[in-house]
Amino acid sequence: MADEQELAQLEILCKQLYDANNPEERATAEKALVNFVHAPDCLPTCRLLLERGDSSYAQLLAATTLTKLVSRNPQTLTLQQRIDIRNYVLTYLA
């Protein structure tokens, strides 16, 4: 499970990706976020970012990542994970 420090770090990386004036800083943030998106434990972290995230950039990352997880090859997620995402999204939108 993601802790507050990890969520804060992800929010900083998202801000650096979208707001950085330094191309090296932006590239470093992008690389770290790509690693996050492909991490096996990104699903619960995305949910926490949507629930507790202060940054709209981080919430965009979480929503985009969830969309990609669901849209990719169905074997990427277990049936239970897909049901959990569906239920979470329906609850989140309600």
Image (cartoon, grey):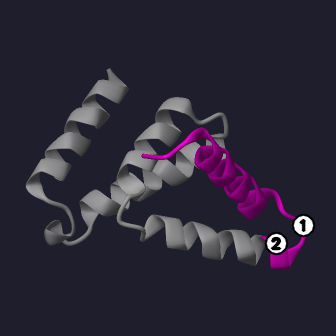
How many C-alpha atoms fall within 10 Å of the one at disc 1: few (<14), some, or many (≥20)?
few
In the image, 65 versus 43, the foreground residue is: 43
Q: Element under label 1? A: loop
Specify the amino acid type for callout 2: Glu
Q: Do the residues labelled 2 and 1 touch (CB within 8 Å)?
A: yes
Residue drawn at (44%, 48%) of the image = 46
The residue labelled by disc 1 is 21
Magenta segment, which residues? 1-25
Gap in angstroms between the C-alphas marked 2 and 1: 8 Å
What residue does disc 2 label?
Answer: 25
Residue 42 location, x and y as percent? 41, 57
Horizontally, is 87 left or right of 44 in the view?
A: left
Instruction: Tell me if residue 88 comes above or below residue 79 in the rendering.
Output: above
Q: Residue furthest left?
A: 79
Q: Where is residue 82 in the image (x, y as percent from the top left)?
A: 18, 51
- Report x, y in % for residue 36: 51, 65
Question: What amino acid does circle 1 point to?
Answer: Asn
